[in-house]
Each structure stands twice: as structure tokens, then as C-alpha cells.
Amino acid sequence: QVQLQESGPGLVKPLQTLSLTCTVSGGSISSGGYYWSWIRQHPGKGLEWIGYIYHTGTTYYNPTLKSRVTMSVDTSTNQFSLNLSSVTAADTAVYYCACSIVTLPAATPNFWGQGTLVTVSS
Amino acid sequence: EIVLTQSPGTLSLSPGERATLSCRASQSVNRYLAWYQQKPGRAPRLLIYGASSRATGIPDRFSGTGSGTDFTLTISRLEPEDFAVYYCQQYGNSAHTFGQGTKVEIK
């Protein structure tokens, strides 16, 4: 069973870059058996899909965020990361890392981290 | 961007009753639709993908139907652990948008 754990700053200043890392256990990023995703949830509101990355580095981003999003994988540490640039208060949310086994659609994760709240404020 | 509208906003039912949740898309998503369950303070849990395929480990009291723009999630007999918020998600369009959720609460 794959387990995921988000880590990173809980507070980011406006216009700075939000950086989060997801540590994977119980599965190997380099195996190619999963798509690795980020999804966020604004406080008290619904969900927003950010994008996913495959172990090859192939990415697929939400067009509404694409200009500010960068995802990467580090197979040596079995981690994948999210960078979101030029943040504003509207980027305050719980950020989830998640993954989909390749037999499922890439955009429908079946394993999720517990989520981490990131607040954008000066 | 495809907008998903879920109805009703809140469904008040008793354990053992049948729950019927609706998700309507602003344009066709074929069968590229998923359903998730979320409990307070927890991550979402994938229930259904491809409009009607149950994810691994999901009880058969959960079923999904529909195609195009109209979709339904049915819980045949509500168990106490089923009271939660349910979201639909489309992945036929690049933004992979979610609906606003339906809360299933105990009556």
C-alpha cells in the first residue's frame, strides 16, 4: 500500500514561491507504476486539481495554473515536488499529494496524503 | 472550463435509506467522470471512475451511472460511515474540474 506525506512551509509570503515535497513509501516512483499528483482544497470549499507528473518527468498541468506551476520527481529520494510561483491569498489552501496506479486514469488518484495547510500572508 | 453542478447541496437521510446524488456537466465529458467521498479533516477517497467502475475496495452499495452531461451516484443502503461529502470530478477536459459537493447528513 502506497503512503504519501506532504512537507513544506505552512506560511508563504505573497509573491513568493510555494514549495512542497511529497515523500512516498510503500512504492517506488522509478517503477513507473503510478502517476503522481497534486490537488488543493481552499478552506471550507471544493477541490482543485493542480497537475500530475510521471516518473519520466512528463507533466500535465491545470491550464488555469500552468504558468505558475512546476512539478518534479527525485527518484533517488523517492519524492516528488510542487512549486507554485507568485502566490497570492487565493492560493491559501490544503495541498494534497496523491497518486493513481497506472491502470486507473491519471487524474483520479486512489492514494492520498493527509494534506498540508499552506497560508499565504505577509 | 467545464463546470460541474452537484445537487442537492445537502441530503438528509437515515441509515438504511437510499441516497441518490446528481452531477451535471456544462458540456459533455463522455464517461470521464469520477466520484469521491470526503470526511471532515480527511483526504478524499476515490469511489468511482469512468462513470461506473468501482475503485478497489469500494463496497458494492456504491454505484455510478450516466454519460455525457448527466451522472448519478447511488448509495443503495446508507451505512453510518457513509455520511460525508461527495464530490464528482470530470477528467475529459484539461482542467479536470470538481463539483462543489453534496453533503449527506444524518436525518
Image (spheres, coloured by chain):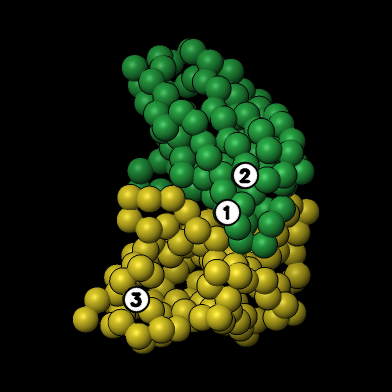
Callout 2: SS? loop
User: Mark 1 = which residue?
Assistant: B97
Callout 1: SS? loop
Identify the residue at horizontal 68%, vertical 75% (top origin): A59
Is there one chain holding both mark 2 and mark 3?
Answer: no
User: Pointer 3: residues within 10 angstroms few (<14), some, or many (20+)?
Assistant: some
Identify the residue at horizontal 56%, vertical 48% (top origin): B3
Task: Tell which circle, 2 or 1, labels the residue nearer the N-terminal end.
Answer: 2
Query: Where does the C terminus of chain A fall, quadrant-wise?
Result: bottom left
- Determine if residue A26 is in view: no
User: Mark 2 = which residue?
Assistant: B26
Query: Considering depth in this image, is A100 or A4 the residue closer to the camera?
Result: A100
- Determine if residue B40 is in view: yes
Identify the residue at horizontal 34%, vertical 17% (top origin): B107
Query: Where does the N terminus of chain A fall, quadrant-wise?
Result: bottom right
Amino acid under label 1?
Thr
Viewer-side label of 2, 3: 2
Which chain corresponds to the colour yellow?
A
